[in-house]
């Protein structure tokens, strides 16, 4: 059934009409003094350091450069789809910003309609009127709290109503939940909701496939185009696993489920366009062969490490030239570990893409000043880019370790732990990444002195905690900080400087690894929630230190100047 016909038949609202954000405009938040409010937006904007996304394209052929342009154009479409998933009607918000940002007590005839470029810019960074680095707090006066389910579900739907609803597609990563004209819940597949946009994106990918110079990349692009049109991604994910020696890369489609904080079921659209560093990638390939041995020796009971992931895993280094959608909202992704489909992981493993130009930007602009502000002067020399790169890289590799299916018959870990699964999965990858480094150091595959990895790891916790409680990465770093502190892995001096106890740090890595693997394997939602609530809060003392970073003007994250023009194409 075509998109237009479907909407007419079931009576739901269209893409640019009412949506899951219905009713938000009636909510209000306390008005602020105009000058203070304006300064607040500019202060928030200043928390993002500007970075130009460029790369050396001189080695690319004319066809490859044209393919980059086509993939960026397709990625731009993912931006529009993500806007709808995260908020709803972007155009209505931005066109009526003078109204939404006015004092709720003010009559519309008296509203100041002067442009607010600062506010528009901050909305664009966050893909909506909620600050992603401040717990999704509203920064537009007439708009209240962000729904946990974003725009994937009706705003008036309760958890109980959803759970009592018998529909085989309700948990699908690729359906919206909506109401028909009788107010009954229904599902609408992504490829029907976004029919026009998806057809255009698929066409662009097919054009790029015609220009592709390696058979594996050509096959992937064609299958990915078909997947966008059908919401069936398995075959394209399997084909993507075979794309290893192509100088270009595109990751595109509905992928991560971070945006759905109600259940963690729905995937959001995004896109990366990347240029592969073939020489650097070759240096990283040797680490993959250790995965089976590392899995076997995980610091957890045998029952929680019986799975054997595919060994066709890939580890590569890339320069990013374009971000869109989910990966571009708020804090920016610095590495990729995909696919998320457990069946593909078990059959072929995973691909880990390290975005080295983004890592370098975040290290220079954020990690270096954090190190000077919060780490003991005697240990500051241990914080370096190589350790930061390694910690990030092995975090992504560690997603392939551990357990994907519960040992208690509750299905996959994602199904059993729902909205908590992302937080625990990111926490697992953090500590198992350090575990991997420990093991590889014993094999003399990497630098054997663990001090740089541990000290940089601690400095990295401060960087990631600042992503806020609305981010799975932010929450898991709060957990890690409090868990490690409880075990004496570091101490804080009266002047607010942190010192690592390297022996206790290693013990805390093994202890947290075991606890998270057991929580995942058991799939016990109540226990997982209690664990996150116990360790996932920011103490007044820590908040004081984080505020100090803001007072020093240290950015919280980065924002991109990017696109075809920036690349000179």
Image (spheres, rainbow, N blue to C red):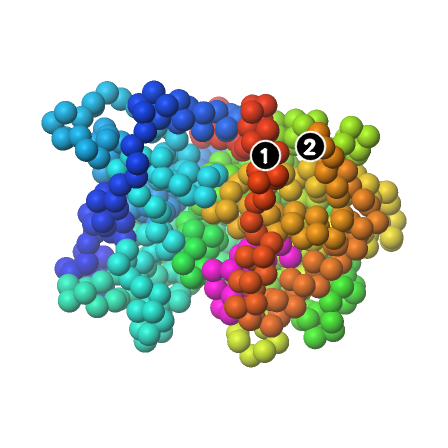
Task: Please provide the residue range marked out in magenta.
Answer: 412-428
- Is 530 in the magenta? no
Q: Position of residue 256 (x, y in %)?
A: 48, 53
Magenta segment main secondary structure? helix
Which label belongs to residue 90? none
Which residue lies under the disc numbered 2?
A: 496
Q: Cβ–Cβ below 8 Å for labels 2 and 1?
A: yes
Return the residue nearer the eye: 252 or 159: 159
Q: Is residue 357 left or right of residue 306?
A: left
Q: Is residue 194 above or below residue 73?
A: below
Residue lying at 57% horizontally and 38% vertically, measured from the top left: 543
Return the residue nearer the eye: 425 or 510: 510
**Mark 2 Cα shell of 10 Å, populated few (<14), some (14-19), many (≥20):** some
Label 2 and label 1: CA atoms lie apart by 9 Å
- Could you tell which of marks 2 and 1 lies nearer the N-terminus? 2
Give the secondary structure at mark 2. Answer: loop
- Is 418 in the magenta? yes
Q: Is residue 46 above or below residue 166?
A: above
Q: Is residue 47 above or below residue 407?
A: above
Which residue lies under the disc numbered 1?
A: 544
């Amino acid at each position: 059934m075509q998109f237009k016909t479907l909407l007419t038949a079931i009576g739901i609202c269209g893409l640019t009409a009412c949506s899951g954000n219905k009713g938000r405009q009636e909510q209000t938040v306390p008005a602020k003094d105009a000058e203070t409010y304006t300064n607040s937006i500019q202060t928030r904007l200043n928390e993002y350091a500007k970075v130009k996304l460029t790369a050396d394209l001189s080695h690319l052929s004319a066809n490859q450069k044209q393919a980059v342009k086509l993939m960026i154009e397709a990625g731009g479409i993912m931006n529009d789809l993500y806007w709808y998933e995260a908020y709803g009607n972007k155009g209505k918000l931005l066109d009526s910003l003078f109204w939404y940002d006015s004092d709720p007590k003010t009559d519309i005839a008296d509203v100041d309609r002067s442009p607010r470029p600062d506010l528009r810019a901050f909305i664009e960074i966050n893909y909506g009127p909620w600050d992603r680095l401040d717990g999704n707090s509203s920064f537009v006066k007439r708009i209240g709290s962000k729904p946990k389910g974003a725009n994937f579900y009706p705003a008036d739907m309760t958890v109980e109503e959803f759970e009592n609803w018998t529909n085989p597609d309700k948990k699908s990563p690729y359906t919206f939940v909506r109401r028909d004209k009788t107010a009954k819940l229904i599902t609408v597949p992504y490829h029907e909701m976004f029919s026009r946009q998806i057809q255009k994106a698929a066409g662009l990918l097919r054009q790029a496939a015609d220009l592709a110079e390696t058979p594996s990349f050509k096959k992937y692009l064609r299958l990915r185009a078909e997947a966008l049109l059908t919401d069936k991604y398995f075959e394209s994910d399997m084909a993507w696993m075979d794309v290893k020696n192509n100088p270009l890369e595109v990751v595109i489609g509905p992928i991560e489920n971070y945006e759905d904080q109600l259940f963690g079921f729905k995937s959001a659209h995004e896109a990366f366009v990347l240029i592969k560093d073939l020489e650097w990638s070759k240096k990283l390939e040797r680490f993959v062969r250790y995965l089976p041995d590392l899995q076997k020796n995980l610091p957890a009971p045998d029952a929680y490490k019986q799975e054997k992931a595919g060994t066709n895993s890939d580890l590569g280094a890339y320069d990013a030239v374009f971000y869109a959608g989910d990966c571009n909202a708020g804090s920016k992704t610095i590495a990729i570990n995909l696919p998320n489909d457990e069946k593909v992981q078990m059959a072929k493993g995973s691909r880990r893409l390290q975005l080295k130009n983004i890592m370098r930007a975040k290290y220079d602009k954020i990690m270096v000043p954090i190190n000077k502000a919060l780490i003991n002067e005697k240990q500051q020399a241990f914080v370096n880019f190589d350790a930061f790169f390694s910690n990030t890289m092995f975090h992504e590799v560690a997603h392939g370790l551990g357990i994907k299916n519960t040992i208690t018959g509750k299905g996959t870990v994602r199904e059993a732990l729902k909205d908590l699964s992302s937080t625990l999965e990111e926490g697992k990858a953090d500590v198992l990444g350090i575990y991997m480094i420990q093991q590889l150091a014993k094999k003399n595959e990497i630098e054997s002195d663990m001090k740089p990895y541990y000290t940089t790891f601690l400095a990295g916790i401060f960087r990631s905690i600042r992503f806020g409680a609305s981010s799975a990465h932010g929450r898991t770093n709060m957990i890690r900080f409090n868990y490690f502190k409880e075990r004496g892995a570091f101490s804080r001096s009266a002047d607010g400087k942190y010192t690592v106890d390297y022996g206790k740090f290693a013990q805390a890595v093994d202890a947290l690894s075991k606890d998270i693997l057991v929580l995942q394997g058991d799939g016990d939602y109540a226990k997982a929630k209690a664990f996150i609530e116990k360790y996932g809060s920011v103490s007044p003392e820590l908040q004081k230190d984080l505020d100090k970073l803001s007072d020093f003007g240290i950015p919280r994250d980065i924002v991109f100047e990017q696109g075809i023009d920036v690349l000179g194409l």
